[in-house]
Image: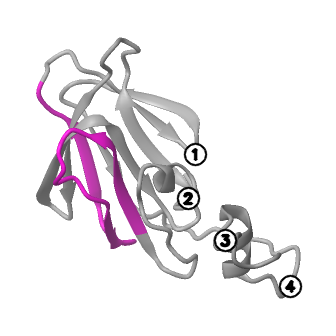
């Protein structure tokens, strides 16, 4: 995925919560109970991850943002980890809880109880084509997100 991965309950019932455990570089870091978990790159940080309360990362920063979706714990805060981190996500708790993995907004696969998903940086980089020179990243953000729109006339 170029922008993000997100995990959410496979069930479309009244309370589609899921229980996930996160391991980073071989160390158990956190458990999430809520509507899901988003892992985003800097290019994906201005989409679903931002809507879930995650930070906006400048495209030159090599990192991954972890943002819980409507967590049931106030301790679940967005975390930024180095791009070379090896992230393992698995379902915990309920034995029949299946989780669906989405990639860049497209339906991915199901993660069955006992399975785990490993996410890490691809071995090859992606090259982006710039259509206009001189575009300001910050001006683009300001215009699209309407920052200070009442203070300045764009």
Q: Where is residue 42 in the image (x, y as percent from the top left)?
A: 52, 68
Q: Which residue is drawn at 81% across and 76% down?
A: 153
Q: Is mark 3 on a helix, strand or loop?
A: helix
Q: Do the residues labelled 4 and 2 touch (CB within 8 Å)?
A: no
Taking depth in this image into account, of 26 and 134 the one nearest to the observer is: 134
- Which of label 3 and label 1 is nearer to you? 3
What crowding class fits label 3: few (fewer than 14 Cα within 10 Å), some (14-19), or many (20 or more)? Answer: few
Front-most of 131 and 46? 46
Q: Is residue 5 left or right of residue 91?
A: right
- In the picture of the structure, the residue carrying the numbered disc 1 is 104
Q: Residue under circle 4?
A: 133
Residue located 64% across and 68% down the image? 126
Estimate the spatial distance between the alpha carbons at disc 3 and disc 1, rounded to whole Å: 20 Å
Compared to residue 132, the image places residue 87 above or below, namely: above
Q: In the image, residue 96 lies at what x, y percent?
A: 20, 15
| Residue bearing the label numbered 2 | 44
Q: Nearer the viewer, residue 123 or 133?
A: 133
In the rendered structure, are the residues bearing label 1 and label 2 in contact, judged by CB atoms less than 8 Å apart? yes
| Residue matched to label 3 | 141
Colour convention: one colour
N-term mark: 4 or 2? 2
Q: Which residue lies furthest to the front in this view?
A: 150
Q: Does the magenta stretch include residue 73?
A: yes
- For residue 28, which quarter of the picture? bottom left
Q: In the image, which residues are magenta?
A: 64-93
Distance from disc 4 to disc 3, alpha carbons, whole Å, reads 16 Å
User: Counting other residues with Cα less than 10 Å from the Cα at mark 4, is it few (<14), some (14-19), or many (20 or more)?
Assistant: few
User: Residue at left 37%, top 32%?
Assistant: 8
Q: Is residue 44 left or right of residue 69?
A: right
């Amino acid at each position: 995925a170029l922008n993000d991965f997100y995990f959410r309950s496979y069930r479309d019932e009244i309370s589609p919560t899921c229980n996930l455990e996160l391991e980073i570089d071989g160390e158990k870091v956190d458990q999430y109970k809520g509507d899901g978990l988003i892992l985003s790159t800097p290019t994906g940080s201005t989409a679903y991850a931002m809507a879930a309360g995650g930070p906006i990362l400048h495209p030159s920063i090599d990192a991954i943002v972890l943002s819980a979706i409507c967590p049931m714990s106030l301790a679940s805060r967005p975390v930024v980890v180095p791009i070379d981190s090896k992230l393992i996500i698995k379902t915990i708790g309920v034995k029949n809880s299946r989780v669906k993995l989405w990639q860049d907004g497209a339906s991915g696969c199901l993660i069955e109880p006992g399975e785990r998903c490993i996410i890490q940086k691809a071995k090859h980089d992606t090259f982006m084509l710039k259509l206009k020179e001189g575009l300001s990243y910050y001006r683009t953000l300001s215009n699209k997100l309407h920052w200070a729109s009442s203070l300045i006339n764009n």
